[in-house]
Image (cartoon, rainbow, N blue to C red):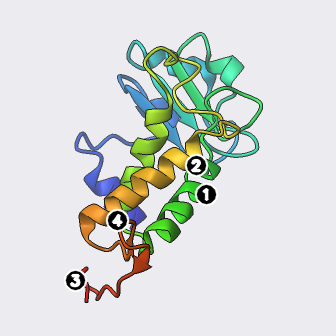
């Protein structure tokens, strides 16, 4: 799968390490290992570049080293702004699925969860150092749960009826009986 991804996501057929191929990029998403990116390499990216350096505990480039070269920086670390952490989605996804009585969690429900997370950051709050809510923001889980319940209903796989307060049996195609 890695080979397929590399072949199908690189139409220019660039080769080399990240420091060599980063020129002209808008976004770097690192899911690899510590210190992979030299800070000065980020200078070759487009203006207002975005870096998600997700290796944990030590990201591909440290935020303080990237700061002069990028507009938005995010990591998986809790000691920096814009921490990207799966704890933002899981409590709400599971709460929403349970509340809906959904027999499974679909890709659409996961996308609804992502939109719920994004909804918590208001236009007034949105800033380069606040593109994603804190893991301590108590609004995240309920907002995500609500979005997941709504999506389960839209897909026809919600078994719990708020009108009757009962569960309905739903087959694999979402039809109830």
Which residue is disc 3 drawn over? 175
At mark 4, the secondary structure is helix
Discs 1, 4 touching: Cβ within 8 Å:
no
Q: For this rendering, which residue is in front, 159 or 74?
A: 159
Is residue 103 shown to the viewer in this render? Answer: no
Measured in 3D between alpha carbons, the distance from the residue under mark 2 to the one under mark 1, in whole angstroms, is 6 Å
Q: Quadrant of the N terminus?
A: bottom left
Q: Answer yes or no: do the residues labelled 2 and 1 have beta carbons within 8 Å?
A: yes
Alpha-carbon distance for marks 1 and 3?
Answer: 27 Å
Whether the residues at callouts 3 and 4 have beta carbons within 8 Å, the answer is no
Q: Earlier in the sequence, mark 2 or mark 4?
A: 2
* C-beta proximity under 8 Å, tags 2 and 4: no
In terms of secondary structure, where does tag 2 sit? helix
Query: Residue 167's image quarter?
Result: bottom left
Residue underneath mark 4:
152
Marks 3 and 4, the one that precedes in the sequence:
4
- Residue occupying the point 49% across, 41% down: 117
Query: Is the C terminus in the top left, top right, bottom left or bottom right quadrant?
Result: bottom left
Mark 1 vs mark 3: give the one in front. 3
What residue is shown with label 2?
Answer: 141
Tag 3 secondary structure: loop
Name the residue: 42% across, 30% down.
27
Q: Position of residue 172 (x, y in %)?
A: 29, 87
The CA span between labels 2 and 4 is: 16 Å
């Amino acid at each position: 799968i890695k080979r397929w991804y590399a072949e199908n996501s690189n139409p220019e057929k660039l080769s080399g390490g990240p420091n060599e191929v980063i020129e002209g990029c808008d976004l770097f998403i690192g899911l690899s290992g510590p210190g992979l990116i030299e800070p000065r390499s980020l200078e070759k990216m487009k203006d207002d570049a975005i870096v998600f350096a997700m290796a944990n505990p030590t990201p591909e480039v440290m935020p303080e080293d990237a700061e002069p070269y990028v507009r938005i920086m995010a990591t998986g670390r809790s000691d920096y702004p814009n921490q990207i952490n799966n704890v933002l989605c899981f409590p709400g996804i599971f709460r929403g699925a349970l509340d809906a009585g959904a027999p499974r969690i679909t890709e659409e429900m996961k996308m609804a969860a992502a939109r719920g997370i994004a909804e918590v950051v208001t236009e007034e709050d949105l800033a380069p150092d606040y593109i994603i809510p804190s893991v301590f923001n108590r609004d995240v889980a309920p907002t995500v749960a609500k979005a997941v319940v709504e999506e389960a209903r839209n897909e026809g796989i919600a078994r719990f009826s708020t009108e009757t307060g009962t569960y309905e049996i739903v087959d694999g195609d979402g039809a109830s009986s």
